[in-house]
Image (cartoon, rainbow, N blue to C red):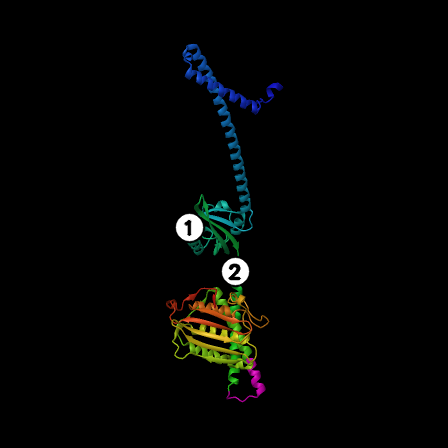
Amino acid sequence: MSPLTDRPATKPPASLRIWLDLLLIAAACLLVSAALFDFRVLLPARALALSFAAAILLGVLLRRAQAHASEAARRLAAELGESMQRLATSEECYRVLVEHAGDPILTFDLADNITSMNRAAELLFGWERAALIGAPAHRLFASESVRALQRWTRASLLTPAEPTQIEVMAVHREGRVLHLEAHAAVFRTGGVPAGTELVCRDTTARTELERLRADFLAMMSHDIRNPLGAIFGYTEMMLDTAHWLSAEQREVLLRINSNTRTVLTLVGNFLEASKIEAGRLLIDRRPVDVNAIVRRTADQYAAHARLVDIDLTVAPTPELPEIAADGLQVERITANLLTNAIKFTPRGGRVTIATERLPSSVAIVVADTGIGIPPHEFSRIFQRYARAGDRNREGTGLGLYIVGTLVEAHGGFVTIDSTPGSGTTFTVYLPICDWRAAQADGVVPAVTATALVQ
């Protein structure tokens, strides 16, 4: 082809096109006026000429309108193409992020069928995605875990909720059991719920380690308690007033007795904490005389209180009604509160344990004149291994955790009233008729204690 044919068609300048449009419009106006007001336009020659001119004018105007419409269509098509390109780029970025994420990600439809999974999920479960896409969730997850996911999904469909964490169990292709933390979220298509997305984290090693630790503590606690109990019993027998002892011998036996009781309390707390964490804590509700438990516990700690020069006072309320509770666990609650009070009260201080009668509950009040607890620690002292006050003192941080958990398991609650430097008062409220009393001898699930702060 010649250079002339290859040269692109040139368009007249924009100003010239505007003037041509104006001239054509003026000519059209003149022709229409002549057709309306001059009768001579009815002559055949003039009518033919006017019709021909009007047709040319109409064609030019239609061509101009078509050119403007084509230009607008080209601009719209270009914008649409750019939007589609941006959407495709964004979708590709999201796909790459999901595919190469470090955590396994799976999606399920509303019928609990697997709809997608990333590379990390393939490595975790040992399956290629082609073998699992379209398979039911039971192919990977335990039945109880699938039911938990179903309950959460249905609740979220009725009341939209934030993504939550669910403990689930799954099975590897080779048959190994996997413990997972699954962060579940409902995803929507066009505003309509389409399924559930799970972002998983493998906690199998941690769960197994926790189980081994709990089993070891339970075994150790059981094996240590028996000889410690024997030592404690022998010292109690030797401290009996029927046996003559010198002052030095009695002081040594008191120290052995006190230290043995401390170790027994620590071992017992570890054992109870292990049961609570494993969900194996049993609450055997029977009629319980709270005053008798308080007196018995105070008698057990009287020798230790004298040894550290602390005035231990018991102030029970007479004619206190019996409550439906586990007497052994109520004694453990009282013992832990007394242990804390004596531990954090300096020599020459005072510890008081009392009972109160309320309309629907019985209260156990343990007050001391110790170092007190700062208000900002009220919300955390009932957590596991949390310690308040003087952290240089011996302890594991399990005593108040066990107190809070046992009180909650009985349907009660604990309040704190403390001023740093002036002492602390713990008040345990146990219902006289617990609404859960019908579940006696049942297993209490692992719960986290909650403190109501005054």
The percent position of residue 230, horizontal first and vertical second, equals 51, 79
* Residue drawn at (46%, 69%) of the image: 414
Is 415 a magenta residue?
no
What residue occupies the far front of the structure in this picture? 37
Our reading of the magenta stretch's main secondary structure is helix
Mark whose residue sits in front, 2 or 1: 1
Taking the image as drawn, is residue 300 in sight? yes
Is 252 a magenta residue?
yes
Quadrant of the image containing the N terminus: top right
- Foreground pick, 79 / 232: 79
Taking the image as drawn, is residue 176 in sight? no
- Foreground pick, 223 / 390: 390
Q: Residue flagged by tag 1: what amino acid is it?
A: Leu
* Residue drawn at (45%, 50%) of the image: 137
Dot 1, crowdedness within 10 Å: few (<14), some or many (≥20)?
few
Residue 207's tag is 2
Q: Which image quarter: residue 14?
A: top right
Whether tag 2 and tag 1 are in contact, CB under 8 A, the answer is: no
- Count all numbered tags in the image, as a single digit: 2
The correct choice, above or below, for 437 with respect to 140 in the image is below
Give the SS element for disc 1: helix
Magenta span of residues = 241-256
Residue 6's tag is none
Q: Residue flagged by tag 2: what amino acid is it?
A: Thr
Q: Give the residue pinned by disc 1.
A: 157
Q: Which image quarter: residue 355?
A: bottom left
